[in-house]
Amino acid sequence: MASTLPRRTSAWARLSRNGLAVVGLAIVVAILAIAILAPLLPLADPNVTAPANRLLPPFSEGAWLGTDQLGRDMLSRLVWGARVSIAVGVAATLVAAIVGSTIGLVAAYFGKLADNVLMRGVDMLMAFPYLLLALAIVAALGPGLLNALLAIAVVNIPFFARSVRGATLGLVQREFIEAARLSGYSNARIILSELFPSVLPVIVITMSTTVGWMILETAGLSFLGLGAQPPQADLGSMLGDGRNLVITAPHVSIVPGVLILVLVIGINLLGDGLRDVLDPRLKSGALSRPVARTAVAEGRTSGTGDRGALLEVRNLRTEFHIGQRVLKAVGGVDFVLQPGESLGIVGESGSGKSVTALSILGLVPTPPGIVAGGEIRFAGRDLLRLPMHDLQDIRGNRIAYIFQDPLTTLNPLMRVGHQVTETLVRHQGLGGSAARRQAEELLDAVGIPQPRTKFDAFPHELSGGQRQRVVIAMSLANRPDLIIADEPTTALDVTTQARVLALLNDLRRQSGAALVFITHDLGVVSELCERVLVMYAGKVVESGPVGEVFAAPRHPYTRALLACVPVLGEPERALDAIPGLPPPVDDLPEGCAFAPRCPLAMAECRRGEILLARTGEGRRSRCIRWMELGDA
Ligand code: ADP
Ligand code: MG
């Protein structure tokens, strides 16, 4: 792997951090090695009887684990028996996995008739008690190891078919499958090259959690005399042989019993470990669900702050701790917002705009996120230290949040009107009919036609613009003091975008709420905002009144951003894309993070921290050469 790539924790590293899984792996590897190497080991013939030496106890001369009722060496039978049990269990797992996964993939991909026929067949298999069905199959086919293997494979097919069908159903509607269809792939090729690799983790997880179970079932059938036939031994038939001798010669049943126990425990520990590693949701090292509030590191200093300010963010540092990596997504952001003021935050994707906004309400997912330092004061209250209950009263009430994609923000199963009333009931304690009346007024105010009827619509019945209007209605419902909007119109077309923005701006001005508006559209910022904050690689690089900053940027990054904005009516103007890429936030360069892409960079820019310095009335820049930029 190239050293410049971000280090991702490998599957192996994640598995080795799970102590129990390592124990399981050691057990499985040890038993497998002995079973595979059985023919090479100096063992007695497992099937040679020696009546003179029957039922020798363990640790006897020439028979470490004793002998059974026919005088056969227990150690040798144990090793050969384990070999048979494991081979049958693994083979049955493979058969069940191949047949079951094929059924699941085909049923989900073709749907309709194929799905009905296949899955009803699987349901029929599941309708019988599991072990009884296996017994019935062996009874019909006749006893023997191969028939036991088939019986166990058949009864396990439904587990694979169902989990693979479920996983595939979620994928067949996705765009990459549509794209494969459009590019003319055959059905078989789509299933094999697009769907199969995506569901492979599901198949492996199901295999690793069922193989232990299948070894137990093989042993069960052999114990009943339906699997391995004498003189061949497997662990189950050895246990069956010892059953009459439990009192007189307990070692004959205890020895294979203990091995079955250890083997199955080992396989299950390893299987659980593998599942944790392969499950994509657990990949970031987060074995738990995110908590309701971002974690905050201890030991921050608390200042007195700016009285009268609505929102004050001081030296905010939010990090993501993923394995050994620390992503400094926000590395010291400062700003103050007065009541009713509107602030735009701009910067390339990944510059930390969303994480800054989410940190304010403690909405950054923990794990892996953590507020490593800084302060956030809202109306004089320290949001990072506020009790959870008080924070919930501020969320959606004093501070409203509008996310980028209205379709994912709205609950698809709730009528949109109810989603508006929900916040009224929660924060204002309104009753049903009063809340409904107020919600209809809000829907009307945000320009939803026929608010009475649209109240009962589901989100999918509205257009994208209408959905975002509903979200704006929700955010304004409790007359918040602050609205945070994170790229609220990126998902909309340009005309709708303009109308929704104008609406947001009007309603905000009427209610006197302050606004933090995140976007990468500089044109929108100049229309909507009074001040602007330019972010790069998690830091504020320039701030000041919008008009002044855009007319005369004092940071090369702001200037470069402005050069990327197309101007209507000036088609001949060359758009200069900024060369290079932002630095990865887990490996920031020393000095100015923009230096590698900056035309003005010199040796001094790459040494020590560059501070955000005052460059004029209400203006600040994190550039030591800002004076050379001149007035563009
Ligand atoms: P933007 O300015 O485009 O809104 P973000 O604030 O979303 O950027 O992201 C800033 C950085 O934080 C990015 O480098 C991103 O990789 C990282 N980041 C954001 N969310 C997470 C997360 N949940 N887990 C890990 N890293 C994240
Ligand atoms: Mg973002």
Image: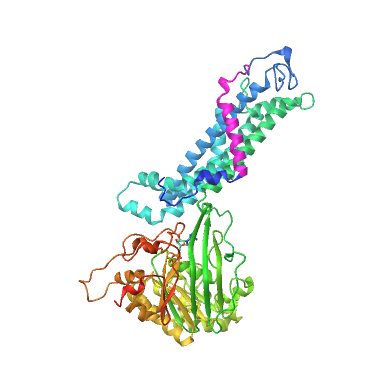
Measured as percent of width and height from the top left, residue 494 is found at: 33, 74
Tell me: residue 6, above or below residue 522: above
- Tell me: 622 left or right of 45: left
Q: Is residue 235 visible?
A: yes
Q: Quadrant of ligand 2?
A: bottom left
- Tell me: 400 left or right of 557: right
Is 412 in the magenta? no
Residue sitting at x 57%, y 65%: 294
Q: Where, by quadrant of the figure, is residue 427 drawn? A: bottom right
- The residue nearer to you, when weighing 527 against 622, is 622
Measured as percent of width and height from the top left, residue 175 is found at: 38, 56
Tell me: residue 192, above or below residue 255: below
Q: Where, by quadrant of the figure, is residue 144 drawn? A: top right
Residue sitting at x 59%, y 64%: 297
- The residue nearer to you, when weighing 574 against 491, is 574
Quadrant where the N terminus sits is top left
- Tell me: 349 left or right of 305: left
- The residue nearer to you, when weighing 13 against 466, is 13
Q: Which residues are magenta?
A: 19-44
